Amino acid sequence: MTKIEEIVQGVLNGDRRSIARAITIIENNTAETQKLIASIYPHTGKAHIIGITGPGGSGKSTLIEKIIRKYRQKGKTVGVIAVDPTSPFTGGAFLGDRIRMQELSTDQGVFIRSMATRNYMGGIAKATKDAVKVLDATGKDIIIVETVGAGQSEVEIIKVAQTIVVICAPGLGDEIQAIKAGMMEIADIFVVNKADRENADKALMDIQAMLQLNNKEKAWKTPILKTAALTGKGVLQLVEKIEEHKHFLEKELERKRSREKAEAELTEAIKEKVATSIIEDLKREGKFEEFLQKILEKEMDPASAAEKLLNERFRKQV
Ligand SMILES: Nc1nc2c(ncn2[C@@H]2O[C@H](COP(=O)(O)OP(=O)(O)OP(=O)(O)O)[C@@H](O)[C@H]2O)c(=O)[nH]1
Ligand SMILES: [Mg+2]
C-alpha cells in the first residue's frame, strides 16, 4: 500500500490520525492532494453540510459545541471545520469548559479541525471543500463549516454548505453590517445569539423586518431564531430548523428529479407519436416503399433517404 492508499483506508475507517493526515495533505496542497481527493471522492455525498457564518465573536464556536451535543444525543456523528477562526476552537470558546471539551475530543463520533487561511497555496475555498470531502468520506452524518462572515468567505460558503446559518449578536454593532455584507441573501436560517443580552430583541426585530422583504419571493422562508449559546437555550429549536431545511432540500431535489423524469417521458412519447404518424403517412403515400427500393438498390443510404423524405414532407406543409 502506498502512503496515500493507507491514509484513504484510514479515513474510510474513521481513523482520527488518518483524517488529520489527510487534511494536512490538503493544507500543503502538494501533488498528492489531487490523488487523495480522487480516491476519496467516490465515498462522499452522504453528509449534510451546514455552514455557520457570522461576525467574529458572535458565538459561532460556542453554538457549534452545543449543536454537536444535540446531534450526538440523536446518535449522529459530526465533523467540524473551522475556517480561520479569530479565536481558536480549542481555546476561547471551550476554555471555560475543559471537562466537557475533553469529552468531545475523545468522542469517536466527533472530529474538529481548525484551518487558518494564511496557510493555503491553493485557496481557502478549495481547501475547505476538500477537507469537507474527507470528513464526508469518514461517514460523518453532519459536517459543520465555521467561517467568519467577512470578505469572501461568506460567499464561498454557499459553494460548500447545503444549509447556511448566519449568526449575529447584539452589541457587536455588526447586525446591520452583517446584512450589508450580503449575508442576509445567503442565510437559510438567521440566528440572533447572546439572547441573554438586553438588546437582543431589538436586533431580532431589526433583522426580522429586513428578512420579511427578502423572503417574499423565496420558496424557503428564512426563519429567525434566538439562541443563548452559553446556556444552550434555543439550540434544540435551531437543530430542528436545520433538519427542516434539510427535508426541504430533499423535497426540492425529489421534485426536480420528478420533473426531469416527466420531461424525458413526455419528449419520448411525442417523438414516438410523431414518428409513427409520419411513417404511416409515408407508407400510405407510397413514398416509404419508393425510398426503400432506392436503399435496396444502393442508390441511397438510409440516413440521406430519411432526410430527403422529411425535407420534402415539411416543405410541402409550409
Ligand atoms: N453573553 C453571551 N456570551 C456568549 C454567548 N455565546 C458566546 N458568547 C461569548 O462570546 C465570545 C465569543 O464566542 P465564540 O464562540 O468564540 O465566537 P465566534 O463567533 O466563534 O468567534 P470567532 O471564531 O472568533 O469568529 C466568547 O467569550 C463566548 O463565551 C451567549 O449566548 N451569551
Ligand atoms: Mg469561532
Image (spheres, helix red, strand yellow):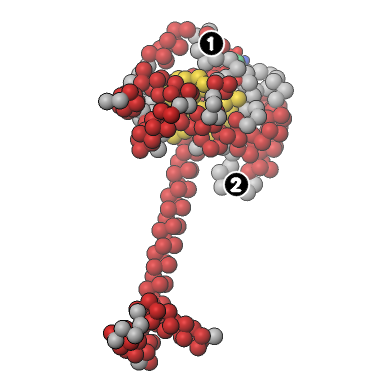
| Element on which disc 2 rests | loop
Looking at the rendered image, the disc whose residue lies closer to the viewer, 1 or 2, is 1
Looking at the picture, how far across and down is residue 60, in whole percent? 56, 22
Label 1 crowd bin: few (<14), some (14–19), many (20+), radius 10 Å: few
Tell me which corner region of the image, top left, top right, bottom left or bottom right, holds residue 250. Answer: top left
Tell me which corner region of the image, top left, top right, bottom left or bottom right, holds residue 92. Answer: top right
Q: Is residue 230 above or below residue 259?
A: above
In primary-sequence order, the first of circles 1 and 2 is 1
Label 2 crowd bin: few (<14), some (14–19), many (20+), radius 10 Å: few
Q: Is residue 298 above or below residue 16?
A: below
Q: Is residue 288 visible?
A: no
Q: Which residue is mark 1?
A: 91
Pick the residue in front: 169 or 78.
78
Q: Residue at horizontal 34%, vertical 85%? A: 299
Cβ of mark 2 under 8 A from ligand 1:
no
Task: Residue type at mark 1: give it.
Answer: Gly
Q: Which residue is mark 2?
A: 218
Q: Is residue 210 visible?
A: yes
| Element on which disc 1 rests | loop
Looking at the picture, how far across and down is residue 154, in whole percent? 60, 32
Looking at the picture, how far across and down is residue 124, in whole percent? 55, 28
